[in-house]
Image: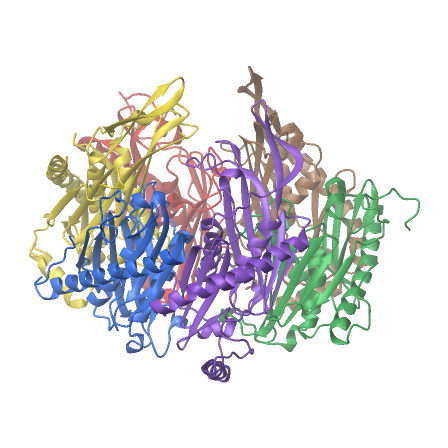
Chain colours: A purple, B yellow, C brown, D blue, E red, F green
Amino acid sequence: MPAVKKHRIVDSITRESIISNLANSTRLDERGLLDYRNLEIETNILKDKTNGSARVKLGESEVWAGIKVETANPFPDTPAEGVMTCNAEMLPICSQYIEPGPPDENTIELSRVSDRGIRESGMIDIKELCIKEGERVYSVYIDVAVINEDGNLFDAVSYAATTALLMADMNKFTIENDEVKMLDEKQPLPIKSVPVSTTFAKIEDKIIIDPNADEQEMATARVTLVTDENGKYVSGQKGKPGGFTFDELKEISVISKEKGDEIRVKIREAVKNGS
Amino acid sequence: MPAVKKHRIVDSITRESIISNLANSTRLDERGLLDYRNLEIETNILKDKTNGSARVKLGESEVWAGIKVETANPFPDTPAEGVMTCNAEMLPICSQYIEPGPPDENTIELSRVSDRGIRESGMIDIKELCIKEGERVYSVYIDVAVINEDGNLFDAVSYAATTALLMADMNKFTIENDEVKMLDEKQPLPIKSVPVSTTFAKIEDKIIIDPNADEQEMATARVTLVTDENGKYVSGQKGKPGGFTFDELKEISVISKEKGDEIRVKIREAVKNGS
Amino acid sequence: MPAVKKHRIVDSITRESIISNLANSTRLDERGLLDYRNLEIETNILKDKTNGSARVKLGESEVWAGIKVETANPFPDTPAEGVMTCNAEMLPICSQYIEPGPPDENTIELSRVSDRGIRESGMIDIKELCIKEGERVYSVYIDVAVINEDGNLFDAVSYAATTALLMADMNKFTIENDEVKMLDEKQPLPIKSVPVSTTFAKIEDKIIIDPNADEQEMATARVTLVTDENGKYVSGQKGKPGGFTFDELKEISVISKEKGDEIRVKIREAVKNGS
Amino acid sequence: MSKNNIERISGRAPDELRNVSIKAGVIKNADGSALIEFGKNKIMAAVFGPKEVHPKHMMISDRAIIKCRYHMMPFSTDTRKRPNISRREIEISKVIREALQPAIIMEDYPRTAIEIYIEVLQSDGGSRCAAINAASTALADAGINMRDLVTACAAGKVDGQVVLDVDDTEDKTGEADMPIALLPNTGLITLFQLDGNLSKEEFDKALELAKTGCDKLYKLQRDALSEKYFDGKNGNKEE
Amino acid sequence: MSKNNIERISGRAPDELRNVSIKAGVIKNADGSALIEFGKNKIMAAVFGPKEVHPKHMMISDRAIIKCRYHMMPFSTDTRKRPNISRREIEISKVIREALQPAIIMEDYPRTAIEIYIEVLQSDGGSRCAAINAASTALADAGINMRDLVTACAAGKVDGQVVLDVDDTEDKTGEADMPIALLPNTGLITLFQLDGNLSKEEFDKALELAKTGCDKLYKLQRDALSEKYFDGKNGNKEE
Amino acid sequence: MSKNNIERISGRAPDELRNVSIKAGVIKNADGSALIEFGKNKIMAAVFGPKEVHPKHMMISDRAIIKCRYHMMPFSTDTRKRPNISRREIEISKVIREALQPAIIMEDYPRTAIEIYIEVLQSDGGSRCAAINAASTALADAGINMRDLVTACAAGKVDGQVVLDVDDTEDKTGEADMPIALLPNTGLITLFQLDGNLSKEEFDKALELAKTGCDKLYKLQRDALSEKYFDGKNGNKEE
């Protein structure tokens, strides 16, 4: 059952430095309150076994995403819709605080929030993932491996998943004499939008963006907002046992859009370079 | 692996009071040895999402039962029979002695004994639960939630399950051109009998009926007998690491029938009032 | 996660005796370094519920194997091939060191090495296990119970599984009007070879065959080699955190063939006597 | 606010809650408990503690630990739910715990555990908000020292209109759902989730609307507690 | 009793047991063990202990704890059983433990565990009774102090007739099965289960009949123990 | 050796390795780490420790315990792998641990744990050998005292020919695969597995060939470590 668990330990000197810096509106790593860390996006890093892949480094946080497109029977209640699954794994190589084993509540939250960002934005047109109604649909698996953990995995996982999806292709099928037949051709996934996640944290009444591991640990509250290219808010999730005021949330929502647009450009660029 | 576990603790004053009362053939809550506690049966308490429901309060023991009737493929070896599943859950809200998590041996026994009472009595005519042989049958799920635990859950769960089944309806289907088609009509479940469970406990050679939690904890042996309306014994289960003599079991079997008949009247009344 | 675990304890007197005996090229139970313990193979010990069965006693190690042949859908990627599963269980009756519960890494290794010996030798012609391509194939379950543990289970399990397979029969089927129909006839399994496992251990630079439990515990390395009747090596597995030199492995491979041939004769004899 | 708007399936005004009733002290064996009926939601919450921490290494020397489980009965949903705890239930358990924890004065209970169990007996839209209101009432009923009650309500978008408290019929055609939880005294939003599609204007409007819902639930919780402790001198029904 | 009755499929008289043989001391590594063949049932029981309790918090200061597991091998049943422990096996483990425990003088072994493992290698009707007889013999073979052996047998109803010891062929058309376990010295029934359909008269008759079966099994257990410890001066086969 | 032989699908000579590159120190949070690319294999290994043992009863008073997990990401295989740990992964974790352990001077770290985590991000034939080379490099990178590096390579039989380092395309028609791990200084083979069909002559030849592969990997590991610690004065690529 979910309960308070062992957390990353931030020593008192680091704590004090982080706080005294924030008081001057700077951060220990010299960023401004609303600056992202360096973001590197690389594509095609797993090209031999996946339909699409990407590696994202956000500061020292590193994640790898791989897309597998298979076919499956549709769910009985949605016979004309494809299936999408998003699964993030905190690999035990990524941090001394991660134990191997079934996903804990934090990892489940990470997977589900990443999934919702993609799903709620309508990024993939699941109606276009139908091969033969009631019989055969595409099943898109998005798996993301966390290789090194230094905070703000919500954003890093989201960027890696989104980029890998943009890079992905899938087999073409045709129906001949009522039988599904695979063609020797590929097509891109039916992409309709590019959602971008932005994550904020609150430390002593200061709102910062893209918290690193120490900042995230010290924060009393965290919130992720996902926007699409039309400037709509498609998904959100607050975490940690503290809260935001209404004004803070409204302010965050404004910044989320601006920063989301900047990052969307970087994702598109990486996709363009990789294609 | 099953093993002795932490049990409810009955303090020594309560223990002595229970025993000295029993010596005078009365009980701490002023009942006679063979008196049931107050039994309240309410129906339709979950009418928005179930096909039938009931709440039973037996003294301070409270359970809620909900029936869901869905359709499923039949088992290969019984192509013309419906499926029935009975599942009781000890919710962690019901007692400080219950931990959340997968069911322990006591809960599994509770589920299985409740299931057998219904199954062995032939209460539901599973042959009537066939929609199309080999293809489609009704699947009846009986789920029972234990909300507050004060002993004798075997009976409380049985009464709730039975009442909910008596209240339940299910969709009608027809077969057109070899295809199963759902009609916009409901029908009651095919009920053939009303089994009633009665539970006895033994404390220092005294046989009591309907033990509360303290009595149940102190008892060296417990036995449940289920009778149907024809006065037949359809199911039985002894529990706890002690025993009954042959004469005690025979005596219990006589009382079980009498008490079963009384309770059957109450169940029928509740169903009549609720319909 | 796999890790060092509690092992059988060998007291220091036994240890010293084993070592001083080995120095003289003999063993505590008076065997030579390359002598197997007494091997008893009995067939048909579970004839009421299995398609084939065998009991093997190798010294004090005792295992029972039972074969069940059922039918199943083929795997999509091998529509014309039957299915074979080999599963060994360390029953908690077999030793004070075995706890009940899901299989640990040692038991999983035992199952998988036994499975590979049979699979890689091509003992069963899985193409002959197809009843109707894409629809119905035989599914052969090999289950082996370890009843008493005294070392070298790799060989004991292998001999029991192999013998039980040689004894097994399965239903005949025919296809009438495109429908699979079971005939009232039995046929033997399509057997193509008889693999034989031999297991060696290394204690202080001495190589011994068929280690008993104490020897196995003391050994720094263990290796199993499976040969078929054409003298081919079909499967191998080293275990324990130590190693063999190249010369040792080559020497072992020579002995493995000789001993394998001797044991193959015993297996064939037991099968002949049992048929 | 309820004029000049598209009519809701439920016939409710855009800023109108479903019927809500809260009853405290419904489970005898629990230290505190509450039953909330919120539209078709029927949800029980029970609190046990402060009690001994088990396993011991989870104990914290200067405050209580909070455990929280949100669980749905198999019969609570449209299609029967499998009895195992789902990933969805694990996530909701976490966000509910994080919504309630800031209200609990954990420092008053060092080296103990406070357990919050939530059982969904019948589900409807907004079950996590309903659950938070029930759990907050149960915590107060258990006599746990709190900074404030925690009150929760969702706003959303249906048929292009921002509305309060989306129910499960509306949710089928709904375009967005945004549940929040609030500590009214401090103005802190301790649960916030969003799924759907909202413009900046709609986002702000939904936040405001959700707040008005929270205010009503706050009163209903206090009424339920008064009802139990002061012979029901205050009403407990939202019309 | 066996005249004027409907003939059983097996050709047995209504009060006739299947062939039974019990052998004690069959597993070298166990502290006590037994193999029972009871009709087609082949069941082994092994006892380990008294031994250290693990995990430690399960330890009881004034008596032993008893662990018991009833487990069926995948090849023991008509259709292959999946290797995982089923709910049925968990329930049977519990009722068998509760049947055996009253016979064990647990106070003689404070702070220890006594483990009873039962393995069904081939199953037939009445496997839980067969298992109890094997386990009771194994406990005695392990030298565990006991008040009495525990003996078990079922009666049932087949073709309208109350009969002893229903086998799996009869069970397919059987109308009732009632396994019991008995401590003969004290007359205490420590396992009792019933499934089926019995009138009051049949119920009483089945109880009596099961008792006669238990008496025979009692003798067979004692013979098996004598066989092992006194060179087999007593026979061990039921004809 | 590479003349007069049947041509391999890959165009490689019978005794030719695939392209291999090893990079040490790739994971910042780990005490030691390495990434190996071995044909299409992309595998990361990380080492944590020596660290506190948890749970405590696993602690050994005079040496370290070694934990090892080999895990494949769902996207690493031809068909998506389910996220749960499979029986295959458990077995491979065990044989890899037993291959590495003899190289670690465990007595230098009493009462501690050394954890080795291997993540297969893209798989090809020979992933367990690739994993051992990565893990051995990661152990050295973590500064764990070792008797020697552990080097691993497979030989096999394809189209009737004994060849070094079977890749997954060859494996589909391959007749045998024999991975080994070696401690070069001591000449000890600490991993040995075989699946397929080899004559005595082929068996011996495969062993010899695998040894030549191990020798090359040994150099590549040392180069990777030099690269990290001495500014890459030594090359790190196998041509």
Q: Nearer the viewer, residue E176 or B251?
A: E176
Residue nearest the viewer, comparing D146 with F60: D146
Determine the image quadrant of residue C239. Answer: bottom right
**Where is residue A1 drawn, in percent x and y?**
38, 60
Coordinates of residue B273 in the picture (x, y in percent)? 11, 37
Specify the farthest residue to the right: F4
Q: Is residue A206 left or right of residue D180?
A: right
Extreme-front residue of the structure? D4
Residue at left 15%, top 40%?
B256
On the image, the x and y values in percent for residue E218 come to: 34, 44
Name the residue nearer the viewer: D37 or E56: D37
Kindly identify the residue that appears in the image at 18 percent across and 63 percent down.
Answer: D219
Above or below E83: residue E55: below
Q: Is residue A244 visible?
A: no
Q: Position of residue B237 (x, y in %)?
A: 26, 43
Snapshot quadrant of residue C264: top right
Horizontal side of D191 relative to B155 (left or right) equals right
Taking the image as drawn, is residue B240 in sight? yes
| Residue B215 located left or right of residue B71 | left
Q: How many marks?
A: 0
In this view, D60 is above or below C209: below
Instruction: Choose between A125 and C249: the one closer to the eye.
Output: A125
